[in-house]
Image (spheres, rainbow, N blue to C red):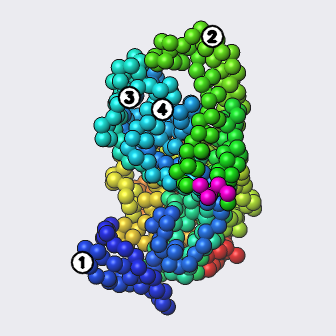
Amino acid sequence: LGSRIQNSQELVSIEQIEDRVIATVNDPVQQKKREISCTYLIGADGSRSKVRELCGIMMSGKRGIENFVSIHFKSPDLRSRMAGRGAMLFFVFNTEVIACIVAHNIEEGDWVAQVPYSPAVQSGQLSDCECHRLVAACIGGGHGAQYSSTGRMGCFNREAGAKLRGLQWELCSAKPWSMDGTMANLFHQDRVFLAGDAAHQFPPSGGFGLNTGLQDAHNLAWKIAAVHHKRASEKLLCSYSSERQPVVSRALDLAIDNHRRGLSVPASIGLHREMLGTLESTLSGPIMTMMPAQVRSQLLETSMRLGQKPLALLDSGEDIQSSATSQVQSPMTKFVSTLFGTPMKEAMRQPAERRESIPMIFPHNDLGIRYPHGLAVCKDGRGESPSNPGRSSVRLHVPTGVPGSRLHHSWLRLKGGTLPHADGLPNPVTEDISTLDLASSLAVCPSSQEPRYVLLVSGDRSHCRAWWNKMEMLSETGSLQIAGICTEKEMASALQADIEQDDYCVLQDLSNQWASTCALRTGGAVLVRPDGHVSWRSCNPPDSDLGDLFAQLQHFLQTGCFR
């Protein structure tokens, strides 16, 4: 890619002058400081962003929604003991621990136990001994299953029962972290931009952090490239903040609300988050702070243990038959566990069945985002107002061709030729490709790496040629590429011509639904930005005057917004 990655560099200062940014970095290996001069600086340096700090950009939102210690451990043996109950998240509630176990890779035995702690009275720094105890409690069901540990290795003893006996694990790391829901007040300051966790931090409930970070980069990269290649004014870069901040804000609300919904399961059995908050406030009050921190920590742990005692009722005989404790469990104990534990299990099951618990996927929120700018240039009069998903919305993604939305996926087939001026796809194309790959490959000039708009036409070669002639103003400058998407019947006529003679090609829509999904009649077209979002749509073939389109595009590239 023509870039260098330099490790062990510490950013010390940022200075912005008229046409560039000067970043001073400290090189501990060379034991000297040096200056890096650049046109733009992108801070993608995580939640504790030094770039954001040096720019004085503040964060808004809520910090410390929850606090956890992540215990990373490996246990390939655990998969074979799960009796087919594979999942991505496992919520553990027993008398010894409350935790969420994340299965990073079940096949390889890569696990992370998220154990809550209270920073008001606890440091969050756990010894190997404490980590072993918590891991054993998570895996063993909180029955005091016997285990032994040496260094970072742990193993259940013979007395632990048939299902646990011999199961081993290895501790990898243990680190405290804070669940925050915050967003930067500014996504850019002159020539400095923030992206990813440097610009926003989400609760992990919903998995929005990675998706929004990638969207940030996609939105910003093509705009910087357009300005760099003098295809656009620097004012275009202002649209990065105006487009991304509303999307991030909605995702942040949803992630926080999704975390709240996840608390409905423990609340159903009496484990209310508010009770823990009250306990934490009491222990961190002015009188209690006079006590040693170790005493307050012990009081919290004792109180938590007492609150978790009723969780023993969740164990019925069949649940703990492999545990050593089941060998001495009296008939009365089994009766009480069944009598009271069954209603508790039913109470936990109901929020999930009513879909009140934490949802895991949000197709509409991940794929259905719409930027408002394109709505002003919907030539067919169908420019709807943005229907971006709001809080508590869990909906399937319904693709459209409405300006501002992402181009939707459809499988295409190219018969008997190559894709002219395509970058990143093998030529000749021998496999079916997605509309997304087609647009992204045509959006970059292979020789100059300049970003380009892509016009996708519904129809055969004659319709592509009509648009090519009308869009000559853009196509001659290299700012536009055209491709046709047609039905199987229309494809037959497309194969009769030599596609190598033109700067556009025609591909067959294998679903025969791409045009109807985009609300295009034969000859209609959508204009796609380099980041895959639709900028403009004409449901009909080109008319005699496209001057308004050219004026709108020019205005957007010069100012960052549509008129």
Decide: marks 1, 3 in contact (CB < 8 A)? no
> Nearer the N terminus, badge 1 or badge 2?
1
Residue that numbered label 4 is attached to: 137
Kind of residue sitting beneath label 4: Ala
Q: Secondary structure at mark 2?
A: helix
Provide the major secondary structure of the magenta segment.
helix
Spot occupied by residue 313 in the image (x, y as percentages of width and height): 63, 22
Label 2, on which residue? Answer: 332
Q: Nearer the viewer, mark 1 or mark 4?
A: 4
Q: Which residue is mark 1?
A: 30
Q: Is residue 336 visible?
A: yes
- For the residues labelled 2 and 4, the Cα–Cα distance comes to 25 Å
Q: Which residue is mark 3?
A: 147
Q: Give the amino acid at mark 3.
A: Tyr
Instruction: Look at the picture and state if 320 lies above or below 147.
Output: above
Labelled pair 1, 4 in contact (Cβ < 8 Å): no
**Magenta segment boundaries in residue numbering:** 287-291
Mark 4, other Cα within 10 Å: few <14 / some 14–19 / many ≥20: many
